[in-house]
Image (cartoon, rainbow, N blue to C red):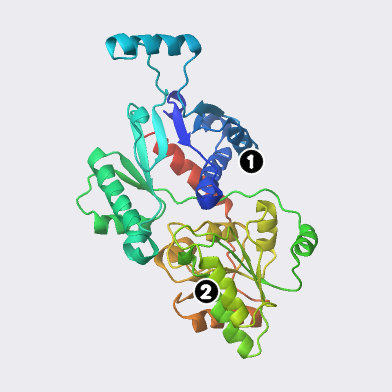
Amino acid sequence: MAQGKRIGIIYSYNEDWIGGAYYIQNLIRSLNYLPKKEQFQLHILTSDKQGFEELKKVTGYPKMKFVSEIIRFNKVEGFINKVSFKIFKNKFISKKIQLNWLFPLFDVPTHLKHVSDLVFWVPDLQEKFLPDFFSAEDVKMRHERYLKMIELNHKIVFSSQSALDDFKTFYPDSKNEKKVLQFAVIHPALIEEDIKSVKERYGITGDYFFSPNQFWQHKNHISIIKAVKILKDKGVAVKIVFTGKEYDYRNPDYTTNLKRKVIDYQLENEILFLGFIDRIDQLVLMKNAQAVIQPSLFEGWSTVVEDAKALNQTLIVSNISVHKEQLGDKGYFFNPNDASDLAHKIDEVISNSMNKLKYDLDYSENIKNFAIKLKMLTNNN
């Protein structure tokens, strides 16, 4: 059982890929939904003790221990190893990170090869479908990473059935055990009255649509800008609020070009760029928007969509397969390569504001299922 195993979770906070940090935070938060007798100890493998303390605070999960990913030796141990290596070409004292199960891994570092149950994670295979958004080196590196996963034959966890299906298409000979773990999000309590102060803080007036995405080119922000231009030319007033870190290492000019397009289209009053903002402020803005727009060309399992679902919000999303997997019939779907289609969906929400479609299901069931599947995964079931 999981209670008898040393369950390891790898964690690092990186604003360049904030979705990865949110994934682990939500994974841990979900365990609070298990009955207390079924909750199990997590060993958080990280290099940052301060980051671990913050993780404890934001997740509220009581059964967590810090495990340094850096193996340290005291002065005596270091001296003994120095002498033994000099004489015998071997270190007399060795230490290993004591874990039985570890997730999520993209590869297996040498100092972790001894862990008996290693679990890989494949969020998506975007580079197979949008190779022009990656360098040739990145595409090659990802392909070689998958081949190594297949060679090592450890379990692979996918963020969606869509990602698993893609992997089977490109690597049909893989014998790895494969699992799908569709994550859910867990939010802190939001105070309804906060929206006034949050809007004032960021200079937002009136109604608005919300699109919170890191500024990576596959997130397809340009489709929203073009749709707003179409609507403005038709006399339809609409305001868009963008949030997210405004940097794409693969295309450093991406955000600058988007802002230039806004100026070219004379949409400065319609489109607002807020950059990377406080998480609570982001959720308050999301909850009170006319709708959340997720125009991405590709996703593994969209955190934006899950955030909006948890808030029972209206969602306008690109019609990619994973969005359909996440939403079923609870969203407005559009062709991400057709700005006029998106403009039509935005106009439809505005015109039917009293009867617009919402994700109106009990989201707590999604969270419980996430926790149960994670527990089953650690039990090797």
Residue 197 coordinates in the image, percent (x, y): 80, 60
Look at the picture and state if 229 lies above or below 333. below
Find out whether the residues at labels 2 and 1 contact each other: C-beta distance under 8 Å: no
Residue type (three-letter) at the residue carrying disc 1: Val
Which is nearer the N-term, disc 2 or disc 1?
A: 1
Instruction: Give the number of the disc on residue 58.
Output: 1
SS category of the residue bearing label 2: helix
Residue 358 coordinates in the image, percent (x, y): 60, 68
Q: Is residue 360 visible?
A: yes
Q: CA distance from mark 2 to mark 1?
A: 33 Å
Residue 323 coordinates in the image, percent (x, y): 46, 64
Residue 380 quadrant: top left
**Viewer-proximal residue, 11 or 359?**
11
Residue type (three-letter) at the residue carrying disc 2: Ile
**Viewer-proximal residue, 128 or 56?**
128
**Residue drawn at (38%, 12%) of the image:** 81
Side of 14 where 274 appears, left or right: right
**Residue drawn at (66%, 90%) of the image:** 235
